[in-house]
Amino acid sequence: MDINAPCISSTIDEHGPIHVYQTRTGLILSFDGKIYQSYMKLKNVNGLALDYTQAMMTGLLFIPVVETATIMGLGAGSMVKNLLSSLSDLKVHAVEYRKEVVKVAKKYFHVPDTDRLVIHIDEAANYLKNTDVKSDIIFSDLYSSEGMDPHQVHSSYLRDCKDALNQHGVLVLNICHTALKSQEEVDGLLALEFENRLLSFEVEGGNTVVIAFKNEIPSITREELLAKAQCLQVKMNIELEPYAQRFCDAQDL
């Protein structure tokens, strides 16, 4: 079904179209005119309007101090904006292989020009193989109009993500098990590459948020995790506690 809203911008690059639609309450980024790639509420341009992006922020609960974050896949920059506006000392690296997407994100979706944000125009797997940046957290959300990017569930990509983390770093993945590989294959691959140092829970739409740890999973109680979620959700202006609850239930905490 086509997006039922006026299209206010259409651009085409070598990878295909890039559309921006405007509703009464927000802007939509779409690559095919059917699927939301990103959504921004006009009254909260730095917020996270889509449920799975809020769920991915649970990875922050396991890091005592976050100084550097990397986001694989800029899109309209929702996660970039939320992190920059919420965590004042954070440096963010965003990797986007379509230069036109970056232009649209800056023009329509308020992605800021700041020395705290470095945008790399590169393919995600190639960037990881060549970067010297070490991050406390990496968010991997690689999707196109055709679904999840196959690189996101390849062993070499996962290994390179792990290498690009600091010693206590975490990788947060938005996984669609209906794409490319079965759930059993993906789960097995993640368990192998991260030596079973994994936590996960399902979100609306059937996707799974996976938190993979470079080293040992920190010891934390349910009460401690929920208290951190309550504090962080105020700072980030997102609904984080319900996802922390779901996470705790999934892990029997």
Image (tube, helix red, strand yellow):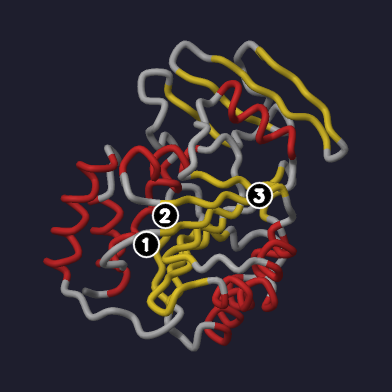
Q: Looking at the image, tell me whether mark 2 or mark 3 is earlier in sequence order.
A: 2
Residue at the image point whose x is 43% and y is 68% from the top: 211
Callout 2 amino acid: Met
The N terminus is located in which quarter? top right
Q: Is residue 178 above or below residue 22?
A: below
178 to the left or right of 97? left
Callout 3 amino acid: His
Secondary structure state at the residue bearing disc 2: helix
Nearer the camera: disc 2 or disc 3: 3
Q: Residues within 10 Å of mark 3 (few under 14, many from 20)?
A: some
> Residue 122 location in percent, x, y?
73, 52
> Residue 163 location in percent, x, y?
57, 77
Q: Is residue 165 above or below residue 105?
A: below
Nearest the viewer among 165 and 178 is: 165
Nearest the viewer among 160 and 177 is: 160
217 to the left or right of 188? left
Callout 1 amino acid: Gly
Nearest the viewer among 6 and 117 is: 117
Where is mark 1, residue-wise? 59
Is the residue under label 3 in contact with that under label 2 (CB below 8 Å)? Answer: no
Residue at the image point whose x is 44% and y is 63% from the top: 137
> Residue 159 location in percent, x, y?
62, 78
Residue at the image point whose x is 67% and y is 47% from the top: 96
Where is mark 3, residue-wise? 120
Is the residue under label 2 in contact with that under label 1 (CB below 8 Å)? Answer: yes
As measured in the structure, the alpha-carbon distance from the residue carrying label 1 to the one carrying label 3 is: 23 Å
Residue at the image point whose x is 73% and y is 47% from the top: 97
227 to the left or right of 138? left
Where is mark 2, residue-wise? 56
